[in-house]
Image (spheres, grey):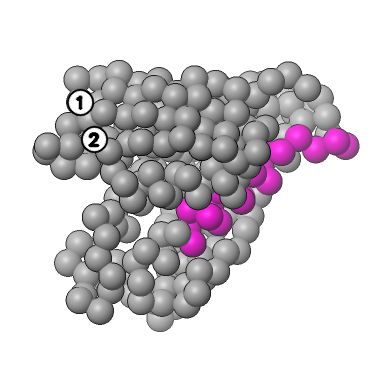
Amino acid sequence: MKSRKAKIIRDTSEVRIQGTINLDGTGKYSVSTGIRFLDHMLELFAKHGLFDITLRAKGDMDIDLHHTNEDVGLALGEAFKKALGDKKGIRRMGACYVPMDETLSRVRAVVDISGRPHMDFGWAAGQKEALYTHGRTKALRRVPYDLADTKHFLESFSAKSGVTLHVDVLKAGGDIHHLLESVFKAWARAMRQAVEVDSRGRGILPSTKGKL
């Protein structure tokens, strides 16, 4: 099978990013974005997706994390798209449930490189998204990265990778760290399924259109 690797590159007046990705790796990682919590989440993504990822980002963190967070998502998404190549033989779709103590997140990821990237973040009945946005209550553990940052990162990844991604939070619990960790782990395992080469479909493009 052809190597599914790509360089992670993005260079703007706000952020410089360099790195590599191997979709058929073993979960090795070396990540430094300047946002330590995002580093932790991407390390989880690599480990649970079995993707080898190296990534270095230097951004205008003296302003805030917005540009760096966004550009890392864009650069990683573009690298995924390049690494997938012609997409022949991939399973294309993947889904996973992942608990983190009191939290249970469900992620459905669909690789659909057809010019229709999409990211949707939903909540089960009774769950309160407001608790996890800016100004969350004192009862929740504070981390320098919140739900709005996660959504923007995933939207950026989706925009450049062409991946349709649905995230459904079934049980939010009360800890923002647990919630976000559950989301990133579930996303990783769903992506791992979606990019996997199906032995029965080897060499076949998984689309009736003949193009993804």
On screen, residue 149 versus residue 160, left or right, reads left
Task: Please tell me which residue is depicted at 45% across the width and 44% down the height of the picture.
Answer: 42
- The outermost residue toward the right is 200
Image location (x, y in percent) of residue 116? 50, 36
On screen, residue 56 versus residue 60, left or right, reads right
Task: Please tell me which residue is depicted at 60% across the width and 41% down the height of the picture.
Answer: 27
- Where is mark 2, residue-wise? 67
CA gap, disc 2 and disc 1: 7 Å
The amino acid on which the numbered mark 2 sits, given as a three-letter code, is His
Query: Does the segment drawn in magenta span residue 117?
Result: no
Q: Which mark is residue 14?
A: 1
User: What's the magenta region?
Assistant: 182-200
Image location (x, y in percent) of residue 68? 27, 35
**Dominant SS type (magenta):** helix
Does residue 140 sit above or below 146 in this rendering?
A: below
Does residue 166 sit above or below 58 in this rendering?
A: below
Task: Please tell me which residue is depicted at 41% across the width and 36% down the height of the picture.
Answer: 31
Q: Is residue 202 visible?
A: yes
Circles 2 and 1, Cβ within 8 Å, touching? The answer is yes
Name the image quarter holding residue 11: top left
**SS at mark 1 in the image:** loop
The amino acid on which the numbered mark 1 sits, given as a three-letter code, is Glu
Image location (x, y in percent) of residue 56? 36, 29
Task: Please tell me which residue is depicted at 74% across the width and 26% down the height of the picture.
Answer: 88
Image location (x, y in percent) of residue 115? 51, 30
